Image (cartoon, coloured by chain):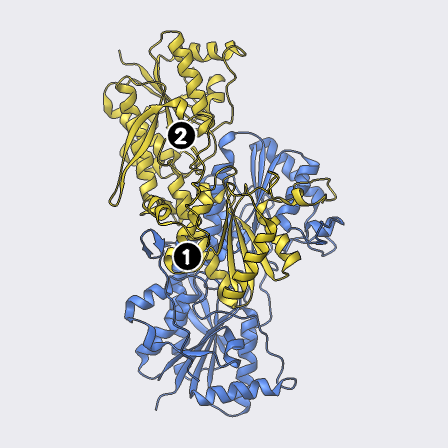
Chain colours: A yellow, B blue
Amino acid sequence: MSKNLLVAQSGGPTAAINATLAGILSAGLESGQVGKLYGGLNGIKGILERKIIRLDNQLNGQAGLDLLAATPAMALGSCRLKLQPEEITPDVYATIEDIFDALDIGYFFYIGGNDSMDTVVKLSDYFAGKGKDVRLIGVPKTIDNDLDNTDHTPGFGSAVKYVVTSLIEVYNDAKVYGDKSVVIVEIMGRDAGWLTASSGLARLTGIPAPHLVYLPEIPFDPKQFIESMNEKIKDHGTVVVAVSEGIRLADGSYAHISAQSSVTDAFGHHALSGAGRYLEMVIEREIGCKVRSIELSVLQRAAAHYASKTDLDEGRMVGREAVSLALEGKTGVMAAIQRVSSKPYRVKVVPIDIRLAANTVKQFPAGWLREDHALSEEAIEYFLPLIQGEAVNATENGLPKYFHFDAKQLAL
Amino acid sequence: MSKNLLVAQSGGPTAAINATLAGILSAGLESGQVGKLYGGLNGIKGILERKIIRLDNQLNGQAGLDLLAATPAMALGSCRLKLQPEEITPDVYATIEDIFDALDIGYFFYIGGNDSMDTVVKLSDYFAGKGKDVRLIGVPKTIDNDLDNTDHTPGFGSAVKYVVTSLIEVYNDAKVYGDKSVVIVEIMGRDAGWLTASSGLARLTGIPAPHLVYLPEIPFDPKQFIESMNEKIKDHGTVVVAVSEGIRLADGSYAHISAQSSVTDAFGHHALSGAGRYLEMVIEREIGCKVRSIELSVLQRAAAHYASKTDLDEGRMVGREAVSLALEGKTGVMAAIQRVSSKPYRVKVVPIDIRLAANTVKQFPAGWLREDHALSEEAIEYFLPLIQGEAVNATENGLPKYFHFDAKQLAL
């Protein structure tokens, strides 16, 4: 009899992670080689708590799968649990094995970022050590795009599309008064500047924004910042800055308010604000012109209302191909995206050793952001295909319509 | 010979104000009764500086008008200048008269909010006093929806659509971990809670968010807030709060960090943050659970990438009808929207005395937000028609495509 399939999601939400889930489920259904389809709620943490539900009887055919693929955030919920090594918590591994046995799981798919890939490393080592044929596949997602050995990650393209479009809209909003003013747009990516740098695509529409771009990979120099800012204000009047939440000063500390001052409020908090507010304060103090900071916050990872069609299509494709890899007998691999060419844009999904994706951070290449803060040709060629097409979400009565699983009936 | 037309924009940007401009220009062109079409740059401030350009020779036909209508912010720029009374600055009025004479302006359209309508009051009084046949028409726009004697204002519907959709996305993002957490969404509207209240439409999709809603019209009680919050956390785990930037304490002061504490930072600033951050601090101090605040900032007024089709259509219609009113001989009026019925939704444009719209603030009706922070049936019936349809912006290469006027060649 066919073995069953278990899938779970982990880490931070994206607009494309449910597209990958939809891809896994449809490939599982269509293969004819998989038994039941199960979903673990709240990632490996929920699986340990036996929060597992049947999915195949809830999908409502192609229409349901399509709606799931366009639903943002995570239909199965998430967790941020990193497994301890087996030596330290043998019970945890034994529990997982018991649960997999009870449900006759032959295929496990974990959709997530580099911490989630670490879970796949540990579980595939464990099951291999037991000599059990459970195929464990990592499936990438993260808006940070910082996973190694994959051209990019599903979820990133939609975040780029939202960030660039929002930055263009913000610039158009800021310039209406024609006076001197600065807008700081703070973008996610604590350790890697991919998403912040991608905002540079805005310049392809003929506008000068973002005029300045600051990434975690390049130490932030406040003096140089003021000099560049004064120059840009003189030349343009309205200046838009794209800054990563993770910019650091020369000493390695984050460029936050708390990093620069001993500010505490009546409630005794230190870290009142992040990089955007920090730059805002620097400008108020050193230049004194009109300034506003905007934190794109979770909006940039949740905005299914304007996802990249290319991203959702690829998210689904990666899910489908991950199932193919498992059915071919692969385990301990991640379904990675390999770019065949940029013009025309073509990619394929290849298996890579899961160890090559876990626990590392792929940084934005030095040289892809030029001296004048414009993107290099190579960077543009890399980013641009990822945002092609608009995958507008389904609506009902003018409001977004999402797919929901019924999570009440647990399988165990 | 036909008199010429002058149009300008004023106040804060919206996603629909260029739709109204497109409506005015197309009706002017099609009427056969209007000569040249001029645009004043940066509102009445720019007109006083003779920054006026020809528009009719730049429109590129229906395609150009359609692109203009879907372009956010303000194609003619804006200002925040409020005219002094004629007795105080007679030169200002004489200058405007000279400029209108020089360009043979017979029709003037000012697209803006209640401050802009005040400009139309003063200019129509002035020209009437001179016995000159210049027809001055106010054309409404504001995301705040606080103009009196119009059912609603163009720009509001698109802001509602963006705010509700973003709030739903934020809720879906927040609930993935299944733990206790609060997200505060700060929404624009310093003096009126229309936009913040409209976020309550999210509940129509079956979710409990926004769980709590706070408006400027209702004094904010921190004790009651903590009580309600504890209850919602107990019942739901994940709680989303919609709060207007303009909420005030019982003593009338804004509920900002500076209103509650003597916090100053290393740079000597007092008003470090607004209502959202204030609620965040209150929750951190009094409840201590995970909390995040998100300020929708200018994104909510600039998001042409997901505008309401109904809103853009109406923006255009109001512009067209404003021209009809002027051609019928009306002056000193605003082209107001009158709702004929909600089911089916039908509106018409009617002239109202411009004095009835200037310098007042229409507040959100008491009773439309229920005790349980849900919208009343009446409120839902009011809001829902305004967000129907998605007017996705034009794109090129995956990036938004906007209309731009060439502002280099001045008419005078």
Instruction: Tell me if I can see residue A6 in this picture.
Output: yes
- Is the C terminus of chain A in the top left, top right, bottom left or bottom right quadrant? top left
Callout 2: few (<14), some (14-19), or many (20+) C-alpha neighbours within 10 Å?
Answer: some
| Residue identified by numbered label 1 | B304
Camera-side residue of A37 and B9: B9
Q: With respect to residue B99, does A283 lie above or below?
A: above
* Outermost residue, right side: B262
| Residue identified by numbered label 2 | A405
Residue A312: percent from left, percent from top: 33, 39
Q: Secondary structure at mark 1?
A: helix
Q: With respect to residue A286, does A267 lie above or below?
A: above
Q: Is B70 left or right of A325, judged from the image as shown?
A: right
Camera-side residue of B257 and B386: B257
> Pointer 1 indicates a residue of which chain?
B
Question: Do pointers 1 and 2 mark residues of a single chain?
Answer: no
Camera-side residue of B11 and A261: A261
Residue B182: percent from left, percent from top: 58, 38
Q: Secondary structure at mark 2?
A: loop
Query: Which-is-in-front pick, marks 1 and 2?
Result: 1
> Pointer 2 indicates a residue of which chain?
A
